[in-house]
Amino acid sequence: RKEVEQDPGPFNVPEGATVAFNCTYSNSASQSFFWYRQDCRKEPKLLMSVYSSGNEDGRFTAQLNRASQYISLLIRDSKLSDSATYLCVVNTKNYGGSQGNLIFGKGTKLSVKP
Amino acid sequence: DAMVIQNPRYQVTQFGKPVTLSCSQTLNHNVMYWYQQKSSQAPKLLFHYYDKDFNNEADTPDNFQSRRPNTSFCFLDIRSPGLGDAAMYLCATSRAKGSLTDTQYFGPGTRLTVL
């Protein structure tokens, strides 16, 4: 299994739709996870952090399933401005372990249409 | 207010001609990273500095070097760019390496073209 794996998409959805992305990771000891958003030809920007079972911020909800080693990102009421690539990122550090690095997935591309 | 600044934003160089990319930060973060990102791929970590300690990824080619003269600045030197080195180069910073709650802040990137 790849360290961090995502469905590349693209996901093409109409405005107002609810869309969900999944991400799987291979290191069962990983403890922290992030979703970054990357617009075309721009830098990644932090969208959400996930340290426990989940996190919610407005229209965005991230959930973590440690048993199955996946993280999901749910976007409700999609806006045109949500169109971007969403990168799943796993911090390889675990409790008591050595210093880790961030491992990036390739990203899932979302296109929200009028 | 820009926190991680990269210069130049676009760099064109010739095959084999050395090039230096620059990154500066106003966050006073301990750690600075250099990533390479090619089209439709994940950012790939090249190396990072934890304060003055340099950490090279095992698969980073020798052609890539880095310098960090002080907390605020970090440079990426590509000694002999090849066509395969054309990519977006992203600089990032974090307060502490590997902290469970640590996040990385990215600069806008330098897009390198090799002719």
Image (tube, rainbow, N blue to C red):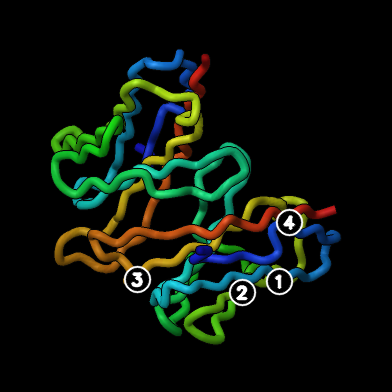
Instruction: Name the residue located 41 percent from the left edge and 81 percent from the top edge.
Output: B51
Report the mark closest to the observer, 2 or 4.
Answer: 4
Work out whether residue A4 or residue B105 is closer to the camera in this orientation and state it: B105
Q: Are marks 1 and 2 in contact (CB under 8 Å)?
A: yes
Dot 1 crowding, Cα within 10 Å, few <14, some 14–19, many 20+: some
Q: Is residue B27 visible?
A: yes
The amino acid type found where label 3 is placed reads Arg
N-terminal of the two: label 2 or label 4? 4
Report the mark closest to the observer, 1 or 4.
Answer: 4
Q: Is residue A9 left or right of residue B21?
A: left
Using the numbered discs, state the Cα–Cα distance from disc 2 to disc 4 in whole angstroms.
Answer: 15 Å
Q: Which mark is residue B10?
A: 4
Instruction: Please tell me if label 2 and label 4 are on a single chain.
Output: yes
Q: Is residue A56 left or right of residue B69?
A: left
N-terminal of the two: label 3 or label 2? 2
Chain ID for label 3?
B
Res. B66 image quadrant: bottom right
Instruction: Please tell me if label 3 and label 4 are on a single chain.
Output: yes
Q: Are marks 3 and 1 in contact (CB under 8 Å)?
A: no
Dot 3 crowding, Cα within 10 Å, few <14, some 14–19, many 20+: some
Q: Position of residue B41 (x, y in %)?
A: 55, 41
From the viewer's perspective, is residue A66 above or below residue B75? Answer: above
Q: Position of residue A77 (x, y in %)?
A: 34, 21
Q: Is residue A20 left or right of residue A41?
A: left
Chain ID for label 1?
B
Using the numbered discs, state the Cα–Cα distance from disc 1 to disc 4 in whole angstroms.
Answer: 12 Å
Q: Which residue is mark 3?
A: B95
